Image (spheres, helix red, strand yellow):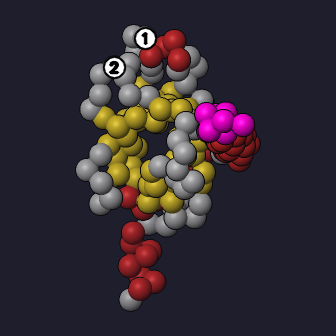
Amino acid sequence: MSLAVVLLSVLLAAAILLCAFLAIRLAQLRRAGTPVLLRTVPAAVDEGWRHGTVHYSDHALRYYRLTSLKPGPNVTFARQGMEISGRRAPEGTETEILDGMLILQVQTAGQTDDDYELAMGPGAVTAFQSWLESRQSARSQRRKSA
């Protein structure tokens, strides 16, 4: 057996393992999270959208990009630092991929200088707003620490 055949066999096995890993990760993320599209702003009207899922916890919202090889979240938003600054309907060519979705403009105070837009279905928007509004107020947190 020549060196070229062995090398090609190893590369083929590595490619198959990588594809299997991606397929398993994609299935796990889709099963466990809420599907969203996310982008940083400012951005052109129809550019920068990334498919992913969000996972809610008591203190953070974790965004996992579907096409990423990173094992952890790609972006983590602290619950206390998030504010919805606006909402809008898809515009222009966004309607082709965001049909039936709402776009929330989100500010992330104290974490990064980036603002984001999250596109999600109406049910996911309701769940997101409920999760965000049910957080403890900064005032009640100050009383606990005193």
Query: Which region of the structure is painted magenta?
Result: 1-9
Compared with 133, 7 (above or below) is: above
Compared with 10, 71 (above or below) is: below
Label 2: element kind: loop
Viewer-proximal residue among 24 and 42: 24
- Looking at the image, do the residues carrying marks 1 and 2 touch, with CB atoms under 8 Å apart? yes
Q: Return the x and y of residue 28 as percentages of the image width and height.
A: 71, 45
Viewer-proximal residue among 95 and 27: 27
User: Is residue 72 among what the camera can see?
Assistant: yes
* The quarter of the displayed image where residue 99 is located: top right
Outermost residue to the front:
1
Question: Is 106 on the left-hand or right-hand side of 23?
Answer: left
- Residue depicted at 46% across the width and 36% down the height: 38
- Residue depicted at 51% across the width and 12% down the height: 96
Dot 1, crowdedness within 10 Å: few (<14), some or many (≥20)? Answer: few
Q: Return the x and y of residue 109 as percentages of the image width and height.
A: 31, 55
Q: Which residue is mark 2?
A: 45
Q: Which amino acid is tagged 2? A: Val
Question: Is 123 on the left-hand or right-hand side of 47?
Answer: right
Q: Which residue is mark 1?
A: 93
Question: Is 99 on the left-hand or right-hand side of 76?
Answer: right
Does residue 3 show up magenta in the picture? yes
Viewer-proximal residue among 68 and 54: 68
Q: From the image, which quarter does the C terminus lie in?
A: bottom left
Q: Return the x and y of residue 34 as percentages of the image width and height.
A: 63, 41
Q: Which amino acid is tagged 1? A: Thr
